[in-house]
Amino acid sequence: MKIIIGYILSVSVCIITLSCKAQSKLQTDFGEVTVNNSDTTMVNKFMAIDFDKYKGLPVGVFLDDINKEYLKRFFYEGRPGYASFLRTLYSKSLVIDVHVEKYEYMNPIDKEYKWDIEKFRKEKLSKIKIRYKGKCIKGCNKEEVDR
């Protein structure tokens, strides 16, 4: 009896482990992407968003509409002391980048790397990009896919 219970537990652990590491395929404008099942729901949700409706609106409108449960949010520095865009990590693999063309409220230059997110939320959104495992899967030009 103990052997049977041990076997059932072993098989159950194996099935659970394999299902957690399972993956699905997603077709994008730039080709097929393999997505971990733990990210599938979030990736599909973000892929369904019409990014064009947010262009020219305050960044805060977009940030309020998307999922607030993220791992980390920070300003990405294109060069030292310059906030190029806002990056939000939803998992190790899933990232959303929010860009503005012209800063009107927040000063993007700060040698101490202390930018004001509330001022950034007022900026007019110009571009949104979704990245998965380092590749841009939505919102990019062809040249930007692997950068």
Image (cartoon, rainbow, N blue to C red):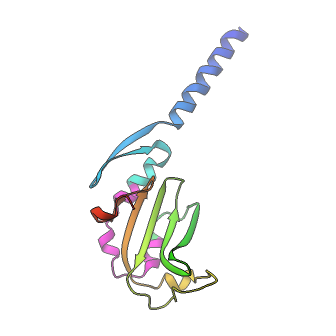
Whether residue 137 is situated above or below residue 5 in the rendered picture: below
Using the image as rendered, state which of residue 24 and residue 103 is in the foreground: 103
| Image x and y of residue 110, in percent | 58, 86
| Image x and y of residue 41, in percent | 44, 50
* Quarter of the view holding residue 46: bottom left
Residue at 28 percent across and 54 percent down: it is: 30
Question: How many labels sit on residues?
Answer: 0
Which residue ends up furthest to the bottom in the rendered image? 104
Residue at 62 percent across and 82 percent down: it is: 114
Residue at 28 percent across and 62 percent down: it is: 142
| Image x and y of residue 1, in percent | 71, 8
* Quarter of the view holding residue 117: bottom right
Using the image as rendered, state which of residue 78 and residue 115 is in the foreground: 78
* 51 inside magenta stretch: yes
Whether residue 25 is situated above or below residue 88 in the rendered picture: above
| Image x and y of residue 92, in percent | 54, 53
Residue at 33 percent across and 77 percent down: it is: 55
Which residue ends up furthest to the top in the rendered image? 1
Task: Quarter of the image for the C terminus: give it.
Answer: bottom left
* 55 inside magenta stretch: yes
Whether residue 112 is situated above or below residue 51 in the rendered picture: below
Q: Mainly helix, strand or loop, the magenta region?
A: helix
Provide the residue span drawn in magenta.
Answer: 45-64
Which residue ends up furthest to the right in the rendered image? 2
